[in-house]
Amino acid sequence: MRYTLQRVGQFVIVFVIVTFVVMVATRIGSKDVARDLAGGAVSDALIERVNNDYPYLDKPLVVQYGYWLKDMVTGNMGTSYAQSQDVVDMFKQRLPVTFFVGFWAIFIGLLIAVPLGVYSAYRRDGWVDRVSSYISFAFISTPPLVFAVFLIYFVALRLDVFPVLSDYVAPWDNPVEHAKNFFLPALSLGMGLAAIWTRFLRADMIITLQSDFIMLARAKGMSPSRILWRHALRASVLSLVTSVALQVSSLVGGAVIAEQFFGLAGIGTRLVFAVQANDILVIQAVTAVLVVTVVAVNLLVDLLYAVIDPRIRHARVFA
Amino acid sequence: MSTTATSSTLDAAEPSAAMSASPQKGSRKRWHPTTIFASIWLGALTILAILADYLPFIRGYQERVKGASRFQFGPGTDFLFGSDQLGRDMFARCIYGAQISLRVAASSILLGLLIGGTMGLAAGYLRGWFDRVISIFVDVLLAFPALIISILIVGRFDVLSASSSTFSWLTRTWSITFVLGLLSIAPIARIVRAQTLSLSQREFVLAARSLGAKNSRVIFREILPNLVPAMTSVVFTGIAVLLVAEGGLAFLGYSVKPPSPSWGLLVSENRERIQEAWWATIFPCIMLFLTVLSFNMIGDRVARRFDIREAAL
Amino acid sequence: MTTLQTSLRSAQGTLIEVKDLKTHFTTPRGVVRAVDGVTFSIERGKSLGIVGESGSGKTVLSRSIMGLLPKHGTIREGSVLFQGQDILHRSPKEMRGIWGSEMAMIFQDPMSSLNPLMKIGRQIAEPLREHLGMSVKDARTTAERLLRDVRIPEAARRLEQYPHELSGGMRQRVMIAIALACGPTMLFADEPTTALDVTVQAQILELINEQRRDRNMSLILVTHDLGVVAGNTDEIAVMYGGKLVEKAPTKTLFAHMKMPYTQALLESIPRLNQPSHSRLTTIPGRPPDLVNPPRGCRFAPRCAFARDRCLEEEPELTKGEQAGHVFACFYPVGSSEYEERKLELKRKSSASAEEGKK
């Protein structure tokens, strides 16, 4: 309990620092904040409205930040004046797109990495291990952008299955179309993840497979598959889980590129557009949501540690 | 993206457990084939990039060859990588792209090494409250969503350089170098701190200190030279990571501006026409891939050779 | 199952016969001859202690008989007959049917040998489900009974606990319960008490022995400590440098030990009846390099009683005067050459003591 509180406290501090710095960054060099919020060259009436909505724009930044934070907590993210769209509505519309890109990327990454990592460690230096270690090294060195180009050129343009430009289709509306639209974007991110995770899992599995309790499991006459999946895998996933959490924040960057490349109307494309248009409120809101997501994933991973390893559970209860 | 050398990758150096007397790889070759490949590729690319202006067979990157408009030429003897929409030589643009990408990545890693390295060295050597302050700073830096902060800063710098004459020198090349340098500070500081911490516990450092050597002497004569292998590895893998980052930012339009060719920019310029002129998109991709791969290979080799575990960006 | 097993249980005769067993590992340094031609057999329901320093090949020998060795780079020659059938060249799949059900092993360190992430009940139930095809419920009941058999209090509650929640002695009892689960005929115990507190060691040995008697199992007890096997096994085999150098029924061995190496091992055990602070004799030198073992007797380079012949010629295992006693030594304890050298040594040491006084 105390441990969890401590972690939450850390995350709150990080959240405040990051969002405050982003706020400062959006205000640097700005001569007329109200005008910038409104989107630059706009009518005086709109600026009036902005000043009405935000009567504190002449106050020090810290005060402004306080008001902003209060707005965020109460769920009021403001309006994108340039697009005359409520920011919360924007999220409702676009967040699922980004979520599914990330979700399927992680899914594909794990789907490849777990069996491959386990098998490579089991048959170490066998041909599967050798081939997969070369390929994963190459994949780690392949930027998502390059994956995307190759997928478009060699898959989308050749097979008439996947669209070159994807659209958002909810999985509950049409699972097949959803899969078609999200497969390539997710794959362009997932292959790199698979490569990293295969290496992590393989390395940890190799260490686990040399441990005494695996020897005991063998001496008990357990089958290799049971030893690998029931005994060794669970003891080897801690760094994999850590890496999944760490990759979530870099996945955000990848998702922006994938969305842009495959023409998905997600948070990423909106953010790039917001920065171009200096749509300050959107920038701030997106950053905040992002940091919260990353924080949430990290907390989740913390809980997962305890589920995986009873010794951690034990240590925390009595800490 | 992390390129950790956690364990055996390209070939396995096996930890022999007490019972499993599995055969280890024999004598370690000094030149691994991958290293040779990577060195040749990087060497050739660097020479071409540096001498691009003087080599007769490399056209100017803005030179529009007459009669070569609209992707007229595919890859061949005349246009090695084909021509682009405006009739420019893709090979020349790729080489000049290398010039830009490599210069940006190398100078940012240098910046990161200078600031992050100093911070890590100080934190690891002096320890105490100094270490704590720097560690918190590093943690906070790592918490920033890298891509968002990058495009945000580049965007703000654009505004600054456009609105005030004091900042007019702040071109995209400068801002992208600054941003990537900023991003590499925290990981580098972390690695250098860890390395320094373990080095300062080693016998020769303790011996030097107990003989009454001054801090500056211990740092410059004992610790810094021993940081070199780890730093070499960090520089190589770091450049690889920064090349990827620069490619992504360029693709989004937040690196150098056209007509300057950076690989990511070339991809974003030409990708819409990939079906009619694959060469204009695929070649920059291959260049980016091979270069990142080579940097990673060398970084990985160095890390493996000196058994550096933390060398991950 | 029961009728077959009971009939096997009651049967007398040889359970395991090891003939000229060699286990070699290929390593970058060369071939390690960890076990180099060992022959012995063990009767049903009997126990054998294998004693030697670390690196003598005793652990490899026990794992080699069971077949629990990494496949990679391991060469095994000779034969191991288990219930009359050669098991040395069986496939891993066939071996899995024997492991845990017919042969079981208790390992040295219960902390690292039990799966830290699996409940104890499940770890005991696993082989029951695998080998005996028990239902989840039956396996659980059996596991609880097994925990009671190895005298773990509150057995039902322990089933739900993880290894880290138990003390070292308790963990070792759990490991014994796992080994006993499917009613094996052959039990291996590899340094079962080394990782435990001195106070618990005797209890664990007692438990192993009692279970062996109750279940009419054969036992191979591997240890570096002659004291551990002294009261606990019917026979003792001493290993050195991958070879058997002396083997005898326990009483005979202690009364008539022939190998200077066995003697040295005995002298290196601290004993309660010795005056405290009396000096322990250690064996000088290090165990032989098993890649390039010495030419003659492998112990000769470290042996105070070795003569030229020992360095040149390898002694064969020969029968002693007592029943079941074999040893490999040219100048065994009690021979005239041995006594002669012993006197010399005594003179020397008293001379040097004199010198020290001056």
Image (spheres, coloured by chain):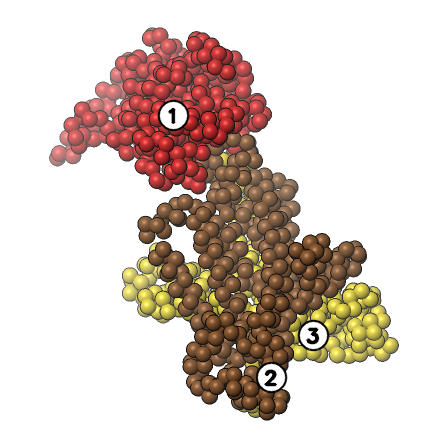
Secondary structure beneath dot 2 equals loop
Q: Position of residue C305 (x, y in %)?
A: 31, 22
| Amino acid type, label 3 | Pro
In the rendered view of the protein, which quadrant contains the N terminus of chain B? bottom right
Q: Colour of chain A?
A: brown
Q: Give residue A39's mark.
A: 2
Can the viewer see residue A267 in this picture?
Answer: yes
- Chain with red colouring: C
| Amino acid type, label 2 | Gly
Q: How would you rate the neighbour count of disc 1 (Cα within 10 Å): few for under 14, some for 14-19, many for 20 or more?
A: some
- Label 2: chain letter: A
Q: How would you rate the neighbour count of disc 3 (Cα within 10 Å): few for under 14, some for 14-19, many for 20 or more?
A: many
Look at mark 3 in the image and give the residue it sits on: B261
For residue C10, above or below residue C231:
above
Q: Position of residue B214 (x, y in %)?
A: 32, 68
Q: Quadrant of residue C211?
A: top left
Alpha carbon of mark 1 to alpha carbon of mark 3: how far? 76 Å
| Amino acid type, label 1 | Arg
Residue at 59% across, 50% down: A110
Look at mark 1 in the image and give the residue it sits on: C145
Q: How would you rate the neighbour count of disc 2 (Cα within 10 Å): few for under 14, some for 14-19, many for 20 or more?
A: many
